[in-house]
Image: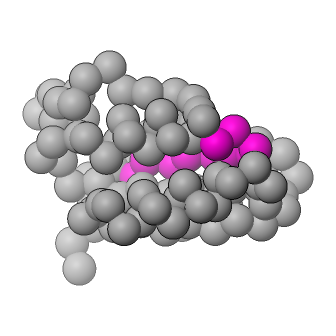
Amino acid sequence: MIAPLLSIITVNYNNKSGLIRTLNSIKNQESVFFEHIIIDANSTDGSKDAILLYEKEITFPLYWVSEPDNGIYDGMNKGIKQAHGEYLFFLNSGDTLISNTILQEIAFRW
């Protein structure tokens, strides 16, 4: 398997609406080989259901887990441990990408 250029790591805790915005932003990206890693801190607000739906809609590699953690930095470290990309990019729940081609534009500059 060829390693992805980019590992996008998303950390979430009980922010379903923000997570959905982030997932939609990533789902609409064009033409870059990336993987998405979602670390959810055992949310109880329906975030897991949003991730399950997202998983059915995408074609790029996805790893996700929902389990208790010790805060945002613990979640980020869990994401790093799962990453296979040459570069890491943290885009947490509620964050969005500026355009559908921004990852392609950044990759072109690398």
- Quarter of the image where the N terminus is located: bottom left
The reply to whether residue 81 is in sight is no
Q: Position of residue 69 (x, y in %)?
A: 83, 58
Q: Position of residue 59 (x, y in %)?
A: 25, 65
Please give the name of the residue rendered at 25% of the width and 23% of the height, measured from the top-left corner.
Answer: 99
Please give the name of the residue rendered at 65% of the width and 52% of the height, measured from the top-left corner.
Answer: 47
- Which residue lies most toward the top here? 98
Q: Position of residue 13 (x, y in %)?
A: 75, 45
Q: Quadrant of residue 97?
A: top left
In the drawing, does residue 75 fall left or right of residue 107? right
- Quarter of the image where the C terminus is located: top left
Q: Is residue 94 above or below residue 76?
A: above
In the drawing, does residue 6 fall left or right of residue 48? left
Q: Quadrant of residue 106?
A: top left
In the drawing, does residue 92 fall left or right of residue 42? left
Q: Is residue 24 above or below residue 55?
A: above
Q: Quadrant of residue 101?
A: top left
The reply to whether residue 46 is in sight is yes
Q: Choose between 108 and 95: the one closer to the eye.
A: 95
Q: Is residue 45 magenta-colored?
A: no
In the drawing, does residue 74 fall left or right of residue 60? right
Q: Which residues are magenta?
A: 7-16
Which SS does the magenta portion mostly show? Answer: strand
Q: Choose between 35 and 29: the one closer to the eye.
A: 29
